[in-house]
Amino acid sequence: MAQYPGTEGEARVPPGRLAADVARVFAACGMGGADAGLLADSLVAADRRGIHSHGVLRVPEYVRKLTGGGVGPRGRPSVASRVGGAIVVDGGNAMGQVAVAFAMDRAVEAAAQHGVAFAAVGRSNHCGAMDHWAMRALPHGMVGLAGTNALPTMAPWGGLDKVVGMNPLAVAFPTAEEPPLVLDVAFGMTAHGKIRVYRQKGHPIPEGWATDRDGDPTTDPAAAVEGLILPAGGHKGIGLAVMVGMLSTLLSGAGYGLESGNMADGAFAGKDGQFCAALRVDAFRPLAEVRARADKVSRELRASRCRPGVEQLHPPGFLEAGFERRYAGEGIPLNAETLAGIRRAAAEVGVAVDLV
Ligand SMILES: NC(=O)c1ccc[n+]([C@@H]2O[C@H](COP(=O)([O-])OP(=O)(O)OC[C@H]3O[C@@H](n4cnc5c(N)ncnc54)[C@H](O)[C@@H]3O)[C@@H](O)[C@H]2O)c1
């Protein structure tokens, strides 16, 4: 993201080669070729959009999970039940990306028939950045929504105990000529993965992101990892996180909050939950009209006045679309630690990777 410390001096990796190399690593963990490709592509898609906290930085922990018995490399999601547009997906303890892609595809099919559909996913695992899954509805002329539970890193408003995950929600809205409007936010002041990127780079985190374990404000990323992440929007952010967490878990029987999955423990079996929803726009209004009006919203946001010192205003998803354009030509910037982590994980499963 734009707020990351500089990426100058970092290696630039062509996205296609990175995805192919990472797919070989996941295939060596026992995943089928199509699933390994889907997982690698989704991580590289996050890096392409500047969301490095949920990109290939995750390869080592995914390899640990896939080889440690926590995630079934050959796990297959399936439809457990369906009532009209209400779908329950059994994630089959596959990687969350495999389960969520399956769930969004089922939601899109059902929304084509019923106008709206909501797929609740259980027996799943970590699924990466949520924008990728919400955007999967866009080529079908649909609004896409995707949410997930996450390991608790926040306390209830005014509390000290880590019992609330930051449970991100993504909403993708189709446009005509403007880039699609895509909001993808977790309800903490920052993502846990982002603090890890700061720790990796040895940079202090911005004030207001986190406290240490005693609830005192800190800019030390190591203390923040042990402490509490502060909610975005105070009690409102905590409330939204609780609700997205419940929508992601209670309707599928997945684990909520402290019961949910744990990426740090390679042997811990998937108890995560997600949801994917699709709204067929032309079941409400003509698609061309809604796309044109979404363009107008986007242009209005961009054309409104900036405060002094601000150069440009960004509709949701525009910063990420900008990174995507830039990195397509320049390659994805990856720091030495991320590259070393991927090489180490690859070597553990007997794969040599080029990367750069
Ligand atoms: N799978 C999981 O368990 C999990 C858990 C937490 C977070 N995440 C992912 O982490 C990623 C990062 O989440 P985050 O909350 O830290 O993101 P963030 O705070 O960087 O916000 C990103 C969103 O805000 C918009 N945005 C950012 N800066 C803006 C600006 N200056 N003006 C206007 N809009 C702006 C972006 O377009 C984007 O939609 C997301 O992809 C999320 O899905 C995943």
Image (spheres, rainbow, N blue to C red):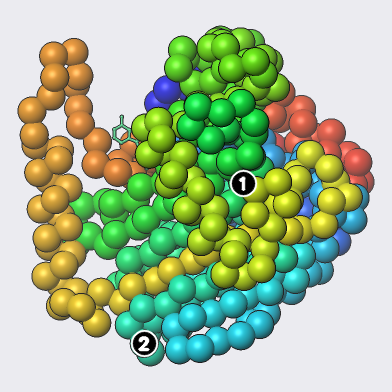
Coordinates of residue 130 in the picture (x, y in percent): 50, 52
Q: Secondary structure at mark 1?
A: loop
Q: Which residue is mark 1?
A: 150
| Secondary structure found at label 2 | helix
Where 99 falls versus 29 (above or below)? below
Q: Quadrant of residue 98?
A: bottom right
Left or right, residue 350 beside residue 90:
right
Q: Residue furthest front?
A: 158
Q: Residue at x 47, y 53 (%)?
A: 243
Q: Is residue 322 among the parts visible in the rendering?
A: no
Instruction: Residue 30: give its label.
Output: none
Q: Position of residue 140 (x, y in %)?
A: 35, 74
Is tag 1's residue or tag 2's residue first in the polypeptide sequence?
Answer: 2
Residue 203 location, x and y as percent?
Answer: 58, 11
Task: Give the Cα separation between the discs numbered 1 and 2.
Answer: 30 Å
Q: Quadrant of residue 139?
A: bottom left
**Which residue sits at x=70%, y=46%?**
258
Callout 1: few (<14), some (14-19), or many (20+) C-alpha neighbours within 10 Å? many
Query: Viewed as shown, does residue 158 lie left or right of 54?
Result: left
Q: Can you tell me which quadrant of the image ligand 1 is in?
A: top left
Residue 15, x across and y down, in percent? 56, 44
In the image, the residue with mark 1 has its CB under 8 Å from the nearest atom of ligand 1: yes
Q: Note whether 172 is above or below 262 in the view shown.
A: below
- Disc 2: which residue: 114
Comparing 59 with 223, the one in front is: 223
Name the one closer to the observer, 206 or 255: 255
Q: Is residue 107 visible?
A: yes
Instruction: Give the residue type that dot 2 points to.
Output: His
Q: Residue at x 65, y 54 (%)?
A: 256
* Mark 2 crowd level (few <14, some 14–19, many ≥20, 10 Å Cα): some
